[in-house]
Structures are given as structure tokens and as C-alpha cells.
Image: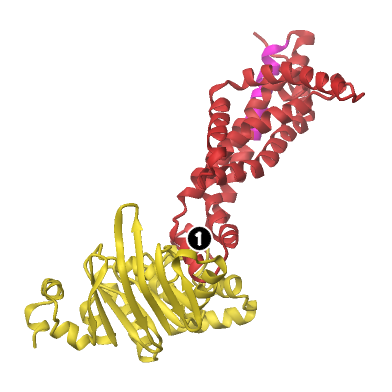
Chain colours: A yellow, B red
Amino acid sequence: MLKVTNIKKAFKDNKVLKGVDIEVNKGDVVVILGVSGSGKTTLLRCINFLEKADSGQLDFDEQHIDYAKVTDKEINAIRKKTAFVFQNYNLFNNKTALENVTEGLIYGRNVPQSEAVSLAKKALDKVGLSERYDYYPSQLSGGQQQRVGIARAIAIEPEVILFDEPTSALDPELIGEVLGVIKKLAEEGKTMVIVTHEMQFAKEVATHAIFMDDGVIVEQGKPEKIFTNPEEERTRKFLRRILPESEYII
Amino acid sequence: MELNYEFMADTFFKLFHALPVTLSITFVALLAATPIAFLLALARIKKIKYLQLPIKLYISLVRGVPMIVQILVIYSLLPSLLNYLFKELNISYNIFDLNTIWYAYIIFTLSTCAMLTEVFRSALQSIDRGQLEAGYSVGMSTWRIYLRIIIPQALVVALPSLCNITVSIIKNTSLVFMMAVKDITAVGKIAASYGYNYIEAYIDVFVVYIIICSVVQILFNVLEKSFGRFRQRVLSN
């Protein structure tokens, strides 16, 4: 469904992506792991053009895009099929929870107002915020804000949802509620690409795991394999640092 | 020393007849300068190449010259310049018949525009870029995001500065008597000069400005409360 080929991106002299390929099929939950600065967030942002890659190809369903000469029309088409959940939530601060969700429906996808409101309510109910429709982001906790962010993403019924470290900005006691929502989406068979540092969670939801380091994919495959029996030394080192010894070698 | 209270009371109400002049200069300056300043602020933020230097020069020019000097220079320069231009172009209009309040409009718009440009620029930049990206991610266009998300928040940030600017325009309009425009200060001066009641007249003028500026500040406070509702941590309904 979604295929990125040989994508490259540099910020001035700093090469962040040095030719990366990934493929996402319908129903996949792809988890991207790696240390900070390995290029995983940039990869995610390049998929829906929040960052413009220098070169490479993107295939989305029948659409073929060359990163070097992408047009605004092509970018819009991709953004209509994807949704993004940000590390810092990035909610619209002057809009209520409900408006945060309807905004994209009405002004991004031309859904009629009344239909948008009912879709938005459905999305907010799903993330457990049926009591918070009229709250502004400043009146919500971090976990609730991120759940609004997820509602905003699922309401537009995207083919793929991209998660950029959705729990990194949260207090430890609030992480669970957000991961719970994402797990539920995974169980429903939603296609997702998730950049995360939550290893236990990644292990549970992933259908495919990718380990990135220094702008390239070091290793990828079934999560059972990557987490328990990685082939590459760099992957092993990374897991050893993050997971307690007993957990990674069975 | 004894004050002429009867004169004071008479003059006090006379001053209010000049209120439209003071307020019209303020409103014209704000209304005309706002759209231009907004575009200039955007040009600064988007770093449009050939506009950066001219805008910066213009702003530091206005900042660096006292209002009264701006008034004196433009009031002595502009009419002669226009007169010359009209003659060259064979326009028969006599520029010296023009109501001098028009020069006040021009001068105040120019200086307000420079101040507003900086206020709008800093206010727009204070809104986190992440909200723009979030708008993109749900398929909204740049101008839609600006119109519905960024600008409404930036305006709330800008309100205290806008209040300052409005009050300072009102106070600066007291200088237009230099151009023979009859604003509140000018009317007070003229009334005083008949019987040398300067103290009474100036006290009146003093009070009138305080009243106007207080009303403006109250209005802005109300605006900030109602438009800034989304910033309150507790729901107030």
C-alpha cells in the first residue's frame, strides 16, 4: 500500500537519511526503533511531507511520487490519505477538543458541518473523551491532549496513521492511557507506523519492527525476532541498553 | 489663586466637541495601518528577499524620529510636493484648500503602521509552528490555517501591545494643533487664550485625556478576556 524507496534527506551538511526503504501493507503496525538522531522521526515526517526529502520515491496505492520534484497537488493527495500524531500533541489551542477534530474534517476534507460534528464525537468517544467535548487544550491533561490528537487523526479515516513518539512528552503515569488507545486501534486492524521508545508496547503491537541507526535501516523483520534474537550487533547494543537483560534473550 | 469654575465647566463640555477629531485620527490610523502592517509582518516572517531592508529601514526611521518632528517634516514637505506634482500633471486642484486633517491621517497611519508591523510579527511568531504542521497533516491549506488557527491566537497575544499603541496614538494626536487641526488640545488652548484661563483649560484637557484613555484600556481588557477564553485553565460557564 505504502512504499518508500531510497529516501535521502540532509539538513545542510548533516545527512539524516542516507537511503532508506520501507514498505507498509494494509493492516500492518510498523514500529520504528532507534536512538535519538537516528533519523526515524525525519523518515516519518517525510512520508506526509512535513519535511521535504531531497530524493527518493514514494508509492502510495497507485500514486507514484518522486521526492525531488513533488507538486503541491501530490502532497495534498498524500495528506488526504494519512494522518499524523505529534510528539507535542500540536492541538489547535484556540479550539475546543471537538473543534480540534472537526476543523480538519470541515476545512481539510470538506465534510459538511453536522456530519463532521457527529464523526468527531464518535472519534472522541473512542479515545474515552466523551465528557470533554467543550474543553480547551489548556484545560486538559497531557494524556487527554494526546488522545484528542489521536481522535483528530482517526476522525479523517486515513489509510495510514503516523505516530511520532506519541508518549515522549507525557508524565509516566499518563503514558498508559495513550498506549491503551493505540493498542485498541491496532486490534481493530488500523494501519499504523509508530516511532516509539516504549519497548514493551512496541513488542506487543508491532507486526513489523524496524531498527534504525545513523540514517539507515540496520535491521528489520518480525518483532519476535528483532526483540529477542537480533542479528546485528548495533541492534543488540541498543536493546541491551533499553531492555533489562532477562527480557531480550529468552 | 482662584480657579474660574464656570469657565472650567463650559470648556470641559466644549472639549468633547473636538472628540471626533481626536478619535477619527486614531481610528483612521489604526484601520488603515492594520492590513498594511499585517502584510509587512508576513513579509518579514517569510523573509521575502527584497522587502526586508526597506521594511527595516522604514521601521527604524519611524522609531528614531520624535512624533512632533515627523509632523513638522511631513506637514511642511508634503503640501509643497503635492502642489508641484499637481502643477506638473495639470491638475487644477488647489492643494492648500485641503483640510489639514488629511495630513494628520497620513502621518499617523505611517507611524502606526511601523509599530503594528513589529507587534504583528512578534505575535505571529509566538504561535508554535507545530499547529501549522497539524493543520497541514489534516489537509488544511496554509491560508485556512492562518485564518482560523494562527491569527486568532496571535491577535490575543497582540492585544496588550495594541492597547498600548492605541493609547499612544490618542496621546500623540495632541500634537496635531501644530498643523492647525482643531483637536481636544487645540480647542483647550484656544479657549484658554481668550481670557488667559490656561490653568483651568489645561486641567480640563488633562481630565478628558484620562477619561478617553481609561475607556480604551477597559475596552481592551474586555476584549482580552473574551477572546482569550481558550487560555483560561478553568471553564467559566
Mark 1 burial class by Cα count in 10 Å: few <14, some 14-19, many 20+: many
Q: Residue at (24%, 64%) from the top-left corner? A: A36
In the rendered image, the vertical position of residue B152 relative to residue A112, given as above or below: above
- Residue A226 position within the rendered picture, expressed as x and y whole percent measured from the top left: 19, 83
In the rendered image, the vertical position of residue B123 relative to residue B91, given as above or below: below
Which quadrant holds the C terminus of chain A?
A: bottom left
Which chain hosts label 1?
B
Determine if the magenta segment contains residue B210: yes
Lateral position of residue B105 relative to residue A176, left or right: right
Q: Quadrant of residue A127?
A: bottom left
- Residue B131 position within the rendered picture, expressed as x and y whole percent measured from the top left: 47, 61
Q: Quadrant of residue A195?
A: bottom left
Q: Using the rendered image of the protein, determine whether residue A115 is visible from the camera's viewpoint.
A: yes
Lateral position of residue B108 relative to residue B115, left or right: right
Lateral position of residue B125 relative to residue A216, left or right: right
Which quadrant holds the N terminus of chain A?
A: bottom left
Q: Using the rendered image of the protein, determine whether residue A148 is visible from the camera's viewpoint.
A: no
Determine if the magenta segment contains residue B122: no
The secondary structure that most of the magenta stretch takes on is helix
Q: Secondary structure at mark 1?
A: helix
**Toward the viewer: B197 or A14?**
A14
The residue at which mark 1 appears reads as B230
**Toward the viewer: B120 or A249?**
A249
- Residue A229 position within the rendered picture, expressed as x and y whole percent measured from the top left: 13, 85
Q: Residue at (29%, 88%) from the top-left corner? A: A207
| Residue bounds of the magenta highlight | B197-212
Q: Residue at (38%, 81%) from the top-left corner? A: A192
- Residue A184 position within the rendered picture, expressed as x and y whole percent measured from the top left: 36, 87
Residue type, numbered disc 1: Phe
**Toward the viewer: B215 or A55?**
A55
Q: Residue at (31%, 69%) from the top-left corner? A: A19
